[in-house]
């Protein structure tokens, strides 16, 4: 679009809501919400930078009803009230827009959409080209040769062809299209069961809504019945979705222009909001420049490729003088145990970084620094604990350096962990996603320089001129992310303490556990594989007998045919395509009454054990150490729990004989024993602490078996009269409720009617009213603030806690109840790991930590140090948190993990 006259219209209300939901909660120094203000103002600054010489206006909805409410009293009737922490940001945002020198328009009685339409059409008549910045699909009806839409949140534009491509209809058909599909958000009735595809198909065939209505009797089936039943209300729906652009508004288009910013007001507002980067820009630029310069790092990076000793020494001196520097390695493999260094990169200030290639290997490669010499020169700096280092997933780099004989010290910050602690659910925590979310930067992806698929190059094969910008950018982006994330994290004292005192120290602890590894009896696993294979074959024969002929027990389609077509078992659930389901939950329910589903489940379980563990574990033994080395992940589980992979130690079953056999293959070498220390019922103890319920506190304080005590309370019998079945029911209630289990779920687990299960729950809450009060209060708190916290301040944000979708909302409510307990348990065992690692390191004990699984720590301990170590481990784990009830740690010992546990 090129013209001497152009008008930029910003749909402020659209971006207000989108910024609020897109950005994590941000607060000013005074604790006021600012995420929507921050998002919209940064978007405006970017637009002013993109369109510095064009006419401009920002339009917001006014409070109160409009003419559409007079047309239809149910218009927007189902919309929930605006969240308080969004409503309070509107007036400050208006003040900021005015301080930036931008025309601000708020018209009572009509919606922002109508104002945008009126201004766009008026400008078009005056010869302007118009860009409407919005994320609202309704605005597509305004698009023509001179009016287009731009969405700055995803950098997309939509012209006439763009509307057709996106919606399948022309801009002049959008109103009819919207009338047909309706709008649940605004409570505009459409035709039931008619979605975008059907609406587009009808309009392609009949061209307009009026013509479709005239031919409604030609539409067959249930969808035709729905159309004919909707004929009376369709004209109203069309009227409600039509943007009124013929209102006479008192605005001179030529006068809609940017004015000089108000420096004093702008500075005051930026100080009030805590927008430090923008505020800093005001000190070195004119106010007008500051208002139009987006808060982003330099657009053109200065990256250096270091190929000579002189340049390398210059960078070493620069790193040595820096308070903090970003560091990254490029390697031969993603497997930390095999990876060797190909090159290293550094950054000490945003926009400036260096890459040092050391081991690129391809025809015509330029001469590089000697790798051994360069790493020897780097080693004192990297091993100096007084020199602060920053990285992205530094645990990997720690391993890689260890492979080269360098013990990385001085790990100060990790941007992956900063993002994870700040908001575990806002985004994935890899560099590319973090750069996009927090910096608005599209990074160079590995596939861009290495290719894809079978022909993808390993890093040493990539030409240095391509590798260098990629590698240097990694260090630069890491530094820039830290400069963005640390202030956000530091605004919350508890979060910052958790980051500094738990997550950063744990990084090195996990690296040591991973390098320690665990010994495996591969002969035992081979024997188990043979036994499982025989059991699997036997199950297949038995299943074939029950079915009347052979079939593939691994084929959902064949299982479906056998269970539902041949055996006529009841259909309990269907797939999205309408087929009878064969998923695990369905088979479990059918297995209560029918033998074949039970056999299929057992077959699945044994097949998974064989393929995942008994067959695969021997393949994962490192030939250099004779042990397996898992990878622990800090930034995956939203609640703070660790996860592991290659192998996944968290999923080895312990409730079945076959699962326990696998644990027997995790062995201690000669002269050592396995010691397993497990927190007992830790989440229930945390529930007692958080709820303060007198009954639970008494049971744990007196050292009672809490499930027996619960059974006695709920079922009204003396503790000595509690049977195995009563204790099992009480255990299901105890654990079920802290996971937010409903009466339906409890009924399924215990084989009760829903009414019986609900009566159990009611009895439980009557005996433990503090638990009920806690659950109610934590749900209410989550709805109010949008997150819950652990005892140590870890936050879990719950974006669906106020969702109108009942299933999403109920899941968020269950998470609100459980997350503080599960997250606190995760924090406690992490604190225990850090304390145990410090003890092992400082006292040089002949023992090492080799695994962490759920609430359990596993050690390998010299036989002559068992008594001392077991007592010390128990004491350290007991003191990892100070709760209202004692922490109980079960410590076991054996020649293998199963014996110890």
Image: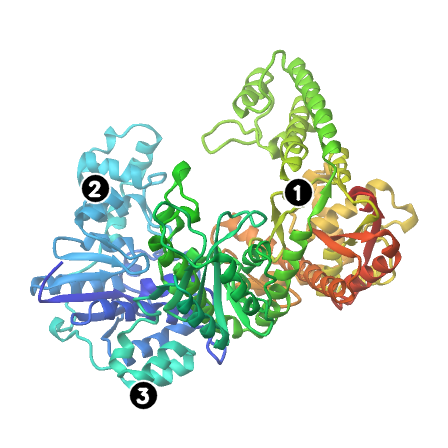
Mark 1, secondary structure of its residue: helix
Q: Is residue 558 above or below residue 607?
A: above
Choose top left, top right, bottom left or bottom right for residue 1: bottom left
Mark 2, secondary structure of its residue: helix
State which tag comes first along the sequence, 3 or 1: 3
Select label 3 or label 1 by which is in front: 1
Residue at image mark 3: 264
Between 732 and 282, the residue placed more toward the observer is 282
Between 781 and 626, the residue placed more toward the observer is 626
Q: In screen coordinates, is 480 left or right of 609? A: left
Asked if the residues shown at circle 2 and circle 3 are in contact, with their CB atoms under 8 angstroms apart, the answer is no
The answer to whether one can see residue 414 in this image is: no
| The label number, if any, that marks residue 651 in the structure image | 1
State which tag comes first along the sequence, 2 or 3: 2
Choose top left, top right, bottom left or bottom right for residue 677: bottom right
Residue at image mark 2: 209
Select label 1 or label 2 by which is in front: 1
Residue 617: image x %, image y %? 66, 37
Asked if the residues shown at circle 3 and circle 1 are in contact, with their CB atoms under 8 angstroms apart, the answer is no
Mark 1–mark 2 distance (CA, rounded to whole Å): 56 Å
- Kindly identify the residue that appears in the image at 18 percent across and 46 percent down: 161
Mark 3–mark 1 distance (CA, rounded to whole Å): 60 Å
Residue 815: image x %, image y %? 59, 54
């Amino acid at each position: 679009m090129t013209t001497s006259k152009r008008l930029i219209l910003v749909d402020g209300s659209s971006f207000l809501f989108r910024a609020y939901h897109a950005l994590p909660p941000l607060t000013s120094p005074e604790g006021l919400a600012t995420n929507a203000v921050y998002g919209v103002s940064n978007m405006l600054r970017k637009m002013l930078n993109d369109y510095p010489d064009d006419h401009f206006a920002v339009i917001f909805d006014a409070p109160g009803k409009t003419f559409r409410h007079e047309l239809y009293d149910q218009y927007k009737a189902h919309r929930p009230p605006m969240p308080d922490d969004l409503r309070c940001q509107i007036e400050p945002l208006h003040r900021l827009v005015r301080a930036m020198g931008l025309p601000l328009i708020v018209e009572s009685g009509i919606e922002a959409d109508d104002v945008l339409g009126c201004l766009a059409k008026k400008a078009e008549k005056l010869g302007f080209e118009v860009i409407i910045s919005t994320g609202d699909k309704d605005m597509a009806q305004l698009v023509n040769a001179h009016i287009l839409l731009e969405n700055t949140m995803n950098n997309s534009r939509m012209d006439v062809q763009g509307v057709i491509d996106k919606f399948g209809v022309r801009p002049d058909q959008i109103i009819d299209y919207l009338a047909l599909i309706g709008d649940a958000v605004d409570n505009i009735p459409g035709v039931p069961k008619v979605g975008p595809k059907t609406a587009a198909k009808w309009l392609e065939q009949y061209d307009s809504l009026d013509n479709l209505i005239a031919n409604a009797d030609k539409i067959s089936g249930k969808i035709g019945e729905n159309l004919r039943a909707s004929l009376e209300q369709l004209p109203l729906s069309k009227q409600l979705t039509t943007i009124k652009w013929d209102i006479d508004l008192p605005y001179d288009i030529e006068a809609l222009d940017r004015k000089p910013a108000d420096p004093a007001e702008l500075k005051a507002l930026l100080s009030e909001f805590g927008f430090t980067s923008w505020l800093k820009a005001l000190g070195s630029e004119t106010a007008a420049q500051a208002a139009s310069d987006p808060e982003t790092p330099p657009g053109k990076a200065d990256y250096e490729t270091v190929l000579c000793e002189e340049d390398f020494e210059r960078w070493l001196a620069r790193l040595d003088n820096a308070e903090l520097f970003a560091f990254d390695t490029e390697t031969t493999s993603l497997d930390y145990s095999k990876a060797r260094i190909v090159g290293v990169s550094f950054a000490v200030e945003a926009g400036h970084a260096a890459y040092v290639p050391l081991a690129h290997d391809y025809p015509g490669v330029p001469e590089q620094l000697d790798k051994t010499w360069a790493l020897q020169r780097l080693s004192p700096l990297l091993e100096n604990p007084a020199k602060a280092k920053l990285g992205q997933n530094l645990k990997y780099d720690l391993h890689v350096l260890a492979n080269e004989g360098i013990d990385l010290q001085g790990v100060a910050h990790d941007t992956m962990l900063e993002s994870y602690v700040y908001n575990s659910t806002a985004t994935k925590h890899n560099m590319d996603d973090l750069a996009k979310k927090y910096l608005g930067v599209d990074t160079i992806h590995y596939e861009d320089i290495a290719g894809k698929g079978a022909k993808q190059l390993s890093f040493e094969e990539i030409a240095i001129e391509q590798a260098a910008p990629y590698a240097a950018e990694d260090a630069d982006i890491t530094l820039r992310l830290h400069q963005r994330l640390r202030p956000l994290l530091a605004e919350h004292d508890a979060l910052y303490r958790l980051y500094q005192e738990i997550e950063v120290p744990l990084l090195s602890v996990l690296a040591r556990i991973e390098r320690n590894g665990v010994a495996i009896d591969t002969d035992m696993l081979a024997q188990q594989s043979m036994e499982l294979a025989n059991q699997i074959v036997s199950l297949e024969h038995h299943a074939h007998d029950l079915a009347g002929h052979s079939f593939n027990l691994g084929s959902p389609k064949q299982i479906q045919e056998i269970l539902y077509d041949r055996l006529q078992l009841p259909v309990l659930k269907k797939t999205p395509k309408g087929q009878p389901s064969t998923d695990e939950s369905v088979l479990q329910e059918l297995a209560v009454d029918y033998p074949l589903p039970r056999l299929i489940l057992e077959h699945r379980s044994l097949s998974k054990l064989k393929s995942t563990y008994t067959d695969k574990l021997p393949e994962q033994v490192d030939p250099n150490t004779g042990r397996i080395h898992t990878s622990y992940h800090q930034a995956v589980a939203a609640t703070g729990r660790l996860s592991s992979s290659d192998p996944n130690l968290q999923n080895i079953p312990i409730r079945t004989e076959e699962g326990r056999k696998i644990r027997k293959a995790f062995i201690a070498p000669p002269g050592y024993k396995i010691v397993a220390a497990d927190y007992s019922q830790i989440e229930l103890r945390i529930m007692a602490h958080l709820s303060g319920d007198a009954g639970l506190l008494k049971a744990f304080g007196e050292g009672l078996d809490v499930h027996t005590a619960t059974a006695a309370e709920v079922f009204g019998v003396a503790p000595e009269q509690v049977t195995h079945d009563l204790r099992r029911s009480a255990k299901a209630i105890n654990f079920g409720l802290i996971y937010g289990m409903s009466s339906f779920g409890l009924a399924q687990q215990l084989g009760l009617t829903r009414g019986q299960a609900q009566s159990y729950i009611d009895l439980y809450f009557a005996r433990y009213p503090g638990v009920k009060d806690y659950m109610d209060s934590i749900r209410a708190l989550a709805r109010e603030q949008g997150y819950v916290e652990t005892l140590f301040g870890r936050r879990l944000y719950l974006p669906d806690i106020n969702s109108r979708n009942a299933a999403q909302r109920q899941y968020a409510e269950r998470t609100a109840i459980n997350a503080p307990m599960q997250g606190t348990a995760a924090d406690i065992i992490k604190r225990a790991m850090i304390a145990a690692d410090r003890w092992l390191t400082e006292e040089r004990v002949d023992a090492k930590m080799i695994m962490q699984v759920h609430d359990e720590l596993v050690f390998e301990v010299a036989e002559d140090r068992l008594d001392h170590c077991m007592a010390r481990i128990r004491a350290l784990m007991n003191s990892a948190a100070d709760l209202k009830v004692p922490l109980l740690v079960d410590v076991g010992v054996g020649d293998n993990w199963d014996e110890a546990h």
